[in-house]
Amino acid sequence: MVGLVIVSHSPEISKGLVQMLVEAQPEVTVMDAGGTDDGEMGTSAMRIQTAIDKADAGNGVVVLVDFGSSVMNAEMAIEMSEAESDIMIADAPLIEGAYSAVMEAGFGKSLEEVVNAATSAKDTKKIQ
């Protein structure tokens, strides 16, 4: 099953989002990589890399980020990772993309299908 890593500058946002995703699809490994190494606001390549390695179950890992340095640190984390499978950063809205991704991962979809579901969340209309 594809694993997910949630990266936000706010550790509270990533923690809450992970809790929501695990409740939606408890069998999917979803790791929290929000905040810095000391729990402050920001992002950490080392924290993201550790989360990627823990989320890797052999079918790929999707990393979802909020903005700015989270992308740069996620890219560095992928380079440092010891994960055995492919890792992709989804260019997706964090909450909607993560929810779409966890649902597809829970249905056993491939890495590419999970990433596509996350990125397609950009087009979700909340108000018709």
Image (tube, grey):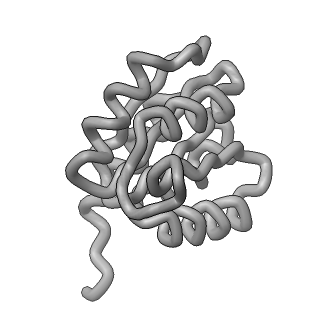
As drawn, the residue found furthest toward the bottom would be 127
> Residue 68 placed where, x, y %?
21, 51
The residue shown at (28%, 41%) is: 71
Residue 30 seen in render? yes
Q: Measured along the vertical axis of the image, is residue 1 above or below residue 126?
A: above
Residue 5, compared with residue 125, is above or below; it is above
Figure disc tally: 0
Side (left or right) of 6 relative to 73: right
> Percent position (x, y) of residue 121?
34, 59
Residue at the (71%, 46%) spot, across then down: 28
Query: Which residue is most to the right?
Result: 27
Q: Is residue 33 above or below residue 78?
A: below
Quarter in which the N terminus is drawn? top right
Whether residue 51 sits left or right of residue 46 in the image: it is right
* Viewer-nearest residue: 56 or 28: 56
Where residue 113 sits: x, y (%)? 46, 36
Residue at the image position 40 percent from the left and 29 percent from the top: 88
Residue 109 visible in the current orientation: no
Among the 4 quarters of the image, the one containing residue 108: top right
Residue 11 in the figure: left or right of residue 96 = right
